[in-house]
Amino acid sequence: MSEETKSEARPSNNDAGGDRRPARRPAAAAAGRRFQRRRKFCKYCADVSLKIDHKDPGMLGQFITERCKILPSRVTGTCAKHQRQITTAIKRARVLALLAFTPLHHD
């Protein structure tokens, strides 16, 4: 086979026919989703009367998983400032045995 017939037998990657991937949807189509996700907000910034206290395990329990891990701010929606305060409060409550370090530590 000559060089010309080899290149004609296989389409190159630059040809329009060689691209088998589906086209991406435009941004306007992505905006028309079925469910509208609610915007997360920091409840401590919205209500300044709420205080983060390490002696309140019920409030701090909202920010830990069932495996006793601290939830990230992208899940809880808290701002960076209050996420740091929540993390410090959870760690202090664990030292005082108000919260468990692991799920194996029972009340």
Image (tube, rainbow, N blue to C red):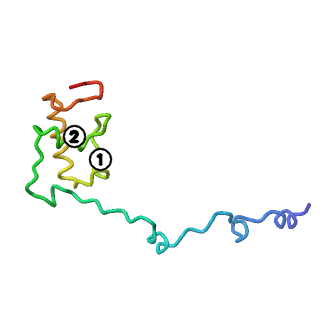
Q: On residue 3, which mark appears?
A: none
Q: Which residue is mark 2?
A: 61
Report the side of 10 relative to 44 (left or right). right
Q: Residue at x 18, y 31 (%)?
A: 94
Q: Quadrant of the N terminus?
A: bottom right
Q: Residue at x 77, y 65 (%)?
A: 11
Vertical placement of 17 versus 100: above or below?
A: below
Q: Secondary structure at mark 1?
A: loop
Q: Secondary structure at mark 2?
A: helix
Query: Residue 21: horizontal and vertical position, in percent?
Result: 64, 63
Report the side of 54 relative to 77 (left or right). left
Q: Nearer the viewer, residue 9 or 62?
A: 62
Q: Quadrant of the C terminus?
A: top left
Which of the two labelled residues, at mark 2 and mark 1, occupies the earlier sequence position?
2
Instruction: Measure how far apart labels 2 and 1 are at the Cα level.
Output: 13 Å
Q: Residue at x 15, y 31 (%)?
A: 98
Q: Which residue is mark 1?
A: 72
Three-letter amino acid code of the residue under disc 1: Pro
Query: Residue 23: horizontal and vertical position, in percent?
Result: 60, 68
Image quadrant of residue 101? top left
